[in-house]
Amino acid sequence: MTGVELARIGKSKVIRRRGMPLRKGRISVSAPYMVVVDYLKHELKRGRWLPGSQLPSESELVRRFGFSRMTINRAVRELQSTGLVERVRGSGTFAAQLHRVSSTLTIRDLHEEITSRGHTHRAEVHLAQEEGLPRTLSEHFGLAAGTLVFHTVIVHHEDGEPLQLEDRYVNPACAPDYLAVDFTRTTPTHYLLEVAPVWEAEYSIESGLPTTREAKLLKIKPVEPCLIVTRRTANSSAPITYVRLVHPGSRYQIEGRFKP
Amino acid sequence: MTGVELARIGKSKVIRRRGMPLRKGRISVSAPYMVVVDYLKHELKRGRWLPGSQLPSESELVRRFGFSRMTINRAVRELQSTGLVERVRGSGTFAAQLHRVSSTLTIRDLHEEITSRGHTHRAEVHLAQEEGLPRTLSEHFGLAAGTLVFHTVIVHHEDGEPLQLEDRYVNPACAPDYLAVDFTRTTPTHYLLEVAPVWEAEYSIESGLPTTREAKLLKIKPVEPCLIVTRRTANSSAPITYVRLVHPGSRYQIEGRFKP
DNA sequence: CAGTGGTCTAGACCACTGA
DNA sequence: CAGTGGTCTAGACCACTGA
């Protein structure tokens, strides 16, 4: 972008201040701070400022664009929060190393996921009962061994094929009516997100073999590698649920993408 | 927090405007917008506004805290960007369902990861050559089959135990000197992040079996489940690298945690 | 129509950096 | 000391919502 073009962008501010609408004809004009965001992103993308090198200062951008400093500041702060630049007070703004691939791991309702692919979802309930928390899970779940908890084992099918075994423990204090839910119609994930807002979560993703029972329920050979996700959620004072999700490796993978 | 306490917070603004420093004695006083952020976070955490319900409006918060509307707006916008609230123009601000567990999947240098655990890292280079891109990878990598690319196969050990097999293809246009690097001293990840800034990335995480050759190099049985990560990075105009990372399931897992 | 959030401005004071 | 980013303010105009 040349200095002339920048000057033209600067002028659009004046127009707005005189009360012109944000739309001229069919062309939508972005908010001034977005103009700056787009400009900086575009130049970063082109490699104009290599990682570690310094970007124009706020006052420099104020001069170039003709916007107020608060507007410039907001734009650059936006890039900072997405990790594209780093700012050092007293020193300057620098292009960041894009090490971090910030992705979003969603606690997504499997029912939604399957139906959004246009497939049918069916849930088989193999266990739904109250029981004492096994000693082995006490630490992971964050409740004392022997505490009465709800335990469900459900196999989710996509178009008739087992896709996920969901072995879940639920803290009755957070969802007292959990066992009354018809899990062939409502998934535990969906129900729990409704009744027990999540404040924090921990998860682990690993590859391993199913237990004998899991293999049988998933209708796979005991030697088939599985993608196993375990997850614990909690609100600010108590654990909500601990779940082990076992997926046949041949049928499930986690995908992600990052683009600033 | 009671109305009285809020009123007191409001007064602190007046003090600042008269030129008092941000620190009184040893007590550090947060910036006003952070006061509002902390207050709203704290109340959300306590469950004061359940998911979907409406938070106080900006003007209401202006009255309560005595800060200017821009300051209140910045605070609430901050919560919005972290996904804690949703805002609808003309309607209001609402507590969000915390479905999204926003986690950060880092492209991390394995050497760093291992040494930060206090362990020793050793890399064995099994292949480093130029070759034509296999047809099967053409689509994944984003280059035509047969294009000359660099290909390296490296096994990374943690305290002498094979932890990761790194099978990597590199676009020579982005890193022409790639093959000159001594990979027993510098990991490909480290080198590439230096010379070829990443603009976008895609990854997939799955569970599967190693190939016969991979199993041999990792010194595991061919039936041991592995956590397999494939990743493609690119800058704005060309793909940089495509890598398949194979980890023995028994020795590696991906962990994450989310807390607003 | 009153209420909501989205955004901009011009000016201000400040802490921190590095020559 | 000049330059940098961090932050706040008081007022403004606007688009959109929903009674």
Image: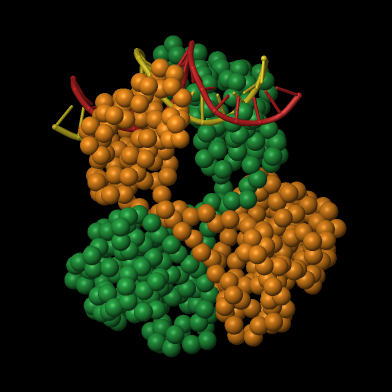
Chain colours: A orange, B green, C yellow, D red
Residue A65 lies in quadrant: top left
Furthest toward the front, the residue is A25
Q: Report the quarter where the N terminus of chain A lies.
A: top left
Which of the 4 quarters of the picture holds residue B150? Answer: bottom left
- Residue A43: quarter of image: top left
Q: Give above or below for A241 relative to A91.
A: below
Residue at 30 percent across and 61 percent down: it is B238
In the drawing, does residue B8 fall left or right of residue A135? left
| The one of B173 and A156 positioned closer to us in this rendering | B173
The residue at 57%/52% (across/down) is: B101
The residue drawn where x is 33% and y is 39% is: A39
- Where residue B44 sits: x, y (%)? 65, 37
Q: Is residue A234 above or below residue C16?
A: below
The answer to whether any part of residue A127 appears in the image is yes
- A214 vs A23, nearest the viewer: A23
Q: Is residue A185 above or below residue A96?
A: below
Q: Nearer the viewer, residue B240 or A240?
A: B240
Count of numbered labels shown in the rendering? 0
Please say whether residue A135 is visible from this viewpoint.
no
Left or right of B31 on screen, residue A9: left
The image shows residue B56 at horizontal and vertical percentages of: 65, 27
B185 w.r.t. A76: above or below: below
Q: Position of residue A63 (x, y in %)?
A: 26, 26
The percent coordinates of residue B220 (x first, y second) are 46, 85
Residue at image x 45%, y 53%?
A: A102
